[in-house]
Image (tube, grey):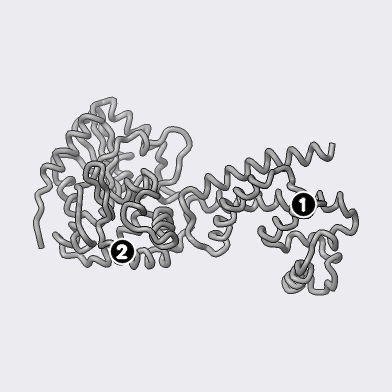
C-alpha cells in the first residue's frame, strides 16, 4: 500500500473556501484518504443535522458541512432551502463553508428557486489518473477491494448518471473521447469527482483500459441492483399518462365526428380489432363478443398503435404536422418504453415529457376546441 501527501490539495481547498465563501466538494468512496486528510485539517466538521441545530453565533473560520448526500433522498429531514438560508447567514458573519458530499451535484433533486448547490462554487477532488479501480486511493492506500469500491462509487453517482453511462458505453458502443463528448458538463463533473475520469487542462480521459470492461461490469451490477424510484419518476409517469390520454381523447372525438355511433367498429383497421377484443376480454370484458360492446376500444391500444390511427384521413394530424409527430415519436416513445419496462430513466427524460405535454395541451386541445366551436 502507498501513502500520499494531500497537504497541497488540502491547502488549495482552504484557499478556495476563503476566496469564494461557499464551495461544494464531491468526495466519495473512491477517495477516502483525501476525505480523511481534509477532515483532519484546521476546520470544523459538522453533519447537516448538527449544523442546523447548533448555535454558532459570530463564529468565523472554515466549516465543513458533511454528509450532504442525505439531500439526495426526497424525504430529507432538512430542506436545501432551509440549509441555504442558514449557510448564507453564517457567511455574512465570516464563516467559510465547504459542502462535503459523496454524491455529485447532478444526483440531487431539482429545487424551486435559488439552489445552494448552484450558488456554491465547485471544488475539485485530487486529480487522479489511473488505469483501473485498483489504483483508486481507497484501494491503493487503504487496501480496499477494487470491485467493491467501484460498485459503491457508481451507486454514489446515482441512477440517472448510470443510465447516461448505459446509453453511451452500452447502447451506443462508444469509448474514449467520443463517449465523453456525448455527456453534459454536470455528468462529466460527477465522473471527475468520482475518479471515473480525469481531467488535465483541456484533456479528459477515462481512468480505465480502452474498452472500459471493468466499468461496464460494475455498471451491470449497479443498474440491476437499483430498485429505488428515481426523483423524477412521478413527474415522468404523470406527464406520459396525460400525454397519452390527450391523444386518445382527440382521436376519439375525431372518430365520433367521422363515424357517429359506429366509431368503435370503424376506427380500428387490420388486425387491431381482434387484438383489442382479445386484450379486453382477457382482462375485463369477459362476456364481450364484439368491439362495439367495449366502452372505449382506444383504451386497449399501446401508444404506438394509437398513433397509427391518426394516419387515417378521417382522423387527421390532430393539429400537429408530420415533422412534429416524428419528433414526438423519436423523443417520447423511448421514454415510455423505459418506463414500461422499469428501466432507469435518464436525466433529460423529465424535461422532454414536460415539453411535449405542453405542446399537446397548446396545440391539440386548442385546435380541437376551435374545430368544435
Q: Residue at x 77, y 41 (%)?
A: 368
Front residue of 285 and 80: 285
Q: Residues within 10 Å of mark 2 (few under 14, many from 20)?
A: some
72 relative position to 61: left or right = right
Mark found first going from the N terminus, 1 or 2: 2
Asked whether residue 28 is in view, the answer is: no
Query: Where residue 211 is drawn, which disc sits there?
Result: 2
Front residue of 115 and 150: 150
Distance from label 1 to label 2 (Cα)? 48 Å
Q: Residue at x 28, y 29 (%)?
A: 91
Looking at the picture, how far across and down is residue 136, in whole percent? Answer: 20, 58
Residue, disc 1: 251
Q: Check contact, mark 1 vs mark 2: CB within 8 A.
A: no
Looking at the picture, how far across and down is residue 151, in whole percent? Answer: 31, 63
Q: How many marks?
A: 2
Image quadrant where residue 116 sits: top left
Amino acid at each position: 500500500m502507498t501513502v500520499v501527501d494531500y497537504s497541497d490539495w488540502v491547502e488549495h481547498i482552504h484557499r478556495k473556501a476563503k476566496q469564494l465563501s461557499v464551495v461544494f466538494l464531491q468526495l466519495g468512496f473512491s477517495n477516502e484518504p483525501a476525505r480523511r486528510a481534509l477532515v483532519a485539517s484546521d476546520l470544523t466538521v459538522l453533519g447537516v443535522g448538527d449544523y442546523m441545530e447548533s448555535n454558532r453565533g459570530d463564529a468565523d473560520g472554515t466549516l465543513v458541512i458533511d454528509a450532504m448526500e442525505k439531500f439526495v433522498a426526497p424525504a430529507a429531514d432538512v430542506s436545501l432551502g432551509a440549509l441555504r438560508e442558514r449557510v448564507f447567514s453564517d457567511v455574512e458573519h465570516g464563516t467559510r463553508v465547504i459542502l462535503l458530499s459523496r454524491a455529485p451535484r447532478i444526483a440531487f433533486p431539482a429545487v424551486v428557486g435559488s439552489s445552494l448547490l448552484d450558488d456554491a462554487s465547485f471544488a475539485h477532488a485530487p486529480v487522479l489518473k489511473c488505469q483501473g479501480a485498483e489504483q483508486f486511493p481507497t484501494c491503493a492506500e487503504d487496501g480496499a477491494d477494487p470491485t467493491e469500491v467501484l460498485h459503491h462509487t457508481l451507486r454514489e453517482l446515482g441512477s440517472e448518471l448510470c443510465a447516461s453511462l448505459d446509453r453511451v458505453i452500452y447502447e451506443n458502443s462508444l469509448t474514449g473521447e467520443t463517449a465523453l463528448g456525448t455527456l453534459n458538463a454536470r455528468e462529466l463533473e460527477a465522473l471527475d469527482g468520482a475518479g471515473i475520469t480525469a481531467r488535465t487542462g483541456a484533456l479528459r480521459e477515462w481512468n480505465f483500459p480502452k474498452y472500459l470492461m471493468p466499468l461496464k461490469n460494475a455498471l451491470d451490477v449497479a443498474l440491476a441492483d437499483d430498485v429505488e424510484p428515481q426523483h423524477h419518476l412521478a413527474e415522468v409517469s404523470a406527464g406520459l399518462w396525460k400525454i397519452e390520454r390527450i391523444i386518445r381523447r382527440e382521436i376519439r372525438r375525431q372518430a365520433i365526428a367521422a363515424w357517429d355511433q359506429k366509431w368503435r367498429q370503424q376506427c380500428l383497421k387490420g388486425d387491431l380489432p381482434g387484438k383489442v377484443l382479445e386484450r379486453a376480454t382477457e382482462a375485463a370484458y369477459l362476456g364481450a363478443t364484439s368491439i362495439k360492446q367495449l366502452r372505449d376500444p382506444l383504451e386497449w391500444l399501446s401508444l404506438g398503435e394509437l398513433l397509427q390511427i391518426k394516419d387515417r384521413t378521417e382522423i387527421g394530424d390532430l393539429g400537429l404536422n408530420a415533422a412534429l409527430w416524428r419528433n414526438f415519436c423519436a423523443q417520447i416513445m423511448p421514454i415510455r418504453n423505459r418506463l414500461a419496462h422499469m428501466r432507469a430513466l435518464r436525466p433529460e427524460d423529465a424535461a422532454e415529457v414536460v415539453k411535449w405535454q405542453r405542446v399537446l395541451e397548446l396545440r391539440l386541445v386548442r385546435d380541437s376546441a376551435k374545430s368544435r366551436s
